[in-house]
Amino acid sequence: MSKLESLDNQFYEEVNFGEKTEIEWRDCDVVIIGGGGSGTVAAVRAVECGARKVIVLEKTGRAGGNAWMAVGMFATNAKMQREAGLEDRSDEVFKSSMDFMEWAADPKIVRRYINNSGTLVDWLVAKGMTFKMDNNHPTPMMLMPKRQSPHNGKDPSHGPGFVGSSVVETMVKEFDKLGIELLLKTKANRLLTDDAGNVTGVVATSLEKEIHIKAKAVVIASGGFGANKEMLKEFFPEFFNIDGDVARLCLGHSTGDGITMARAIGAQTGEYNGIQLGGPCHHPWAFSVHNSLIRPESIWINKNGERFVDETVSFRGFYAMGKQPGTIVYGIYDGVTRDYIIEKFKEDPRSKHEIEYMLSLKEDLEQENDGRRVFIADTLEELAAAIGVNAKTLTATVERYNSFCETGYDADFIKNKEFLRPIVKAPFYAVLGQRFYDTTHGGLKINERLEVINTNGNVIRGLYAVGDLASGWITQNYAPGAASLSWCFNSGYMVGEEAAKYAQMKA
Ligand SMILES: Cc1cc2nc3c(=O)[nH]c(=O)nc-3n(C[C@H](O)[C@H](O)[C@H](O)COP(=O)(O)OP(=O)(O)OC[C@H]3O[C@@H](n4cnc5c(N)ncnc54)[C@H](O)[C@@H]3O)c2cc1C
């Protein structure tokens, strides 16, 4: 996959470490591998719970990881929810999540995590964060009332300023106050163990030297493995051993380093894994063009020139797309619908903060009209030739669809008549859509105290795992309450307590 096909070119820069000859020896209570969402929260909570010296290793040049991209999280029974008269929905969210995951996730882990979610928000509010509640969501969501830091990316639907990056920024400010050391451009390479197999530290590499850190507890918070093709094939052969490209939304740091390191000392992997799959997306190009593709007013055609789905499925078309030739789609609409889409977008209160990006749809389409991403033509025949589809088939597909628009009844896929818009007036557009995935979920088996389990089913003393690479909190059925940003911060919070307790016991 080229750099263009990921968000890397906006938010990620690879660091080249090379071989080192100098070695530095360090000592601490808790070392945390990864300064992303879960790692930054874990560090602060560990110090608050009595860990004396905490070091965070971050292999990139900034803290944040994929949490930097994430928008919102769920919480129940937070003080601000109670004050707003909202009842405690912890039991209901737990039950519905477990039912949805067919009880294949670990109920002890899920229960502890959901019960902690309100406490986490109270804690963040006490540190100065502000949240807006969205109770119309299947689970009570916590969102930022407005971005806490300016967005500087090309796609305003995620990225700096939402909950993910704001929590990280809040945590990093706490680092200074609490004396937490954040070693940027420092990559953890392997775990140290004693004769009994207990974990005693980490070996890392900075730009200058190798660092051997002796620690009472080690927390692996290094994120998922979405940028590791071999691991993707191993954990998800059904999706990644097949033809066709899948766009990666997670950043290039997601190479599953924590899984590799823990496996090398006998950790168990593979149970309850999931991956966030979707499609279509037009990525990482203009936000407006992407939205025009997933708006239900467009139609999606495959390389045979045929519709295959009710387009209101929005970005939940991964599996249907996987069955189409080349696994891609083209979103087709005309100039009238192009303007109509902008008007509909304005009406949607959820997208208020993004509307300014949508207003440039016409210009963005013209800019991307390069024979690869977007195609613009005066006739449907020309459009068909441009995208390499049989002109007769495409014209027949559009004529049939237009007849549905006239009668208000989609006889093929029963698309809601509200979205039936005929394709009649030039210019005609075709927007390329690919399948995508964002983060991977799971890998290392843990218990409800976030301790890593070995292949014999025993705890590896001194080793904890949190965030995307921990298993047990989720399955391939991505449950509403299992929202990964919530898990990442809650598991970070809980592991801070656990690791500090363990370090004090070892002192
Ligand atoms: C585009 C996008 C949008 C998303 N939106 C949402 C959302 O709205 N809601 C939601 O619930 N979830 C969302 N997610 C998922 C969410 O961002 C992740 O679940 C969450 O960030 C996981 O946290 P983490 O701490 O496990 O990993 P990360 O936040 O990815 O952090 C891992 C950190 O570890 C570092 N690291 C890795 N290996 C090493 C090593 N060897 N040594 C040192 N450091 C290392 C990495 O550089 C990184 O900084 C989104 C993800 C993406 C990609």
Image (cartoon, helix red, strand yellow):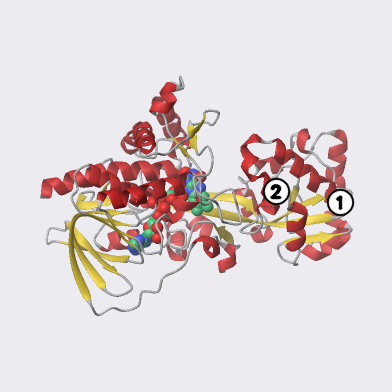
Residue 166 horizontal/vertical position (percent): 45, 46
Q: Is residue 317 left or right of residue 52?
A: right
Residue 441 visible in the picture: no
Give the position of the N terminus as an image quadrant: bottom right
The residue carrying pointer 2 sits among few (fewer than 14), some (14 to 19) or many (20 or more) residues within 10 Å by Cα, namely: many
Q: Is residue 101 left or right of residue 417?
A: left
Residue 495 at x, y percent in the picture = 28, 45
Q: Is residue 499 above or below residue 116?
A: below
Q: Assess mark 1: CB under 8 A from ligand 1?
A: no
Residue at left 88%, top 37%?
406
Depth check: give the residue in front, 191 or 384: 191
Around disc 1, counting alpha carbons within 10 Å, would you say few (fewer than 14), some (14 to 19), or many (20 or more)? Answer: few
Q: Quick one: SS at disc 2?
A: helix
Per the model, the C-alpha gap separating discs 2 and 1 is: 31 Å
Q: Earlier in the sequence, mark 2 or mark 1?
A: 2
Q: Residue at x 67, y 50 (%)?
A: 357
Tell me where residue 63 sits by quadrant. Answer: bottom left
Q: How many marks?
A: 2
Q: Position of residue 436 (x, y in %)?
A: 57, 55
Q: Is residue 23 left or right of residue 437?
A: left
User: Visible in this render: residue 342?
Assistant: yes
Q: Which mark is residue 30?
A: none
Q: Mark 2 — residue?
A: 358
- Label 2–label 1 contact, CB within 8 A: no
* Residue 396 image label: 1
Task: Place residue 88 in its image quadrant.
Answer: top left
Amino acid type for the residue under numbered disc 1: Ala
Task: Give the residue type that dot 2 points to.
Answer: Met
Q: Relative to 105, is 299 on the left or the right?
A: right
- Which residue corresponds to the image point at 35% horizontal and 50% vertical from the top-left? 173
Residue 461 position (above or below residue 254): above
x and y, in percent, of residue 388 in the image: 78, 65
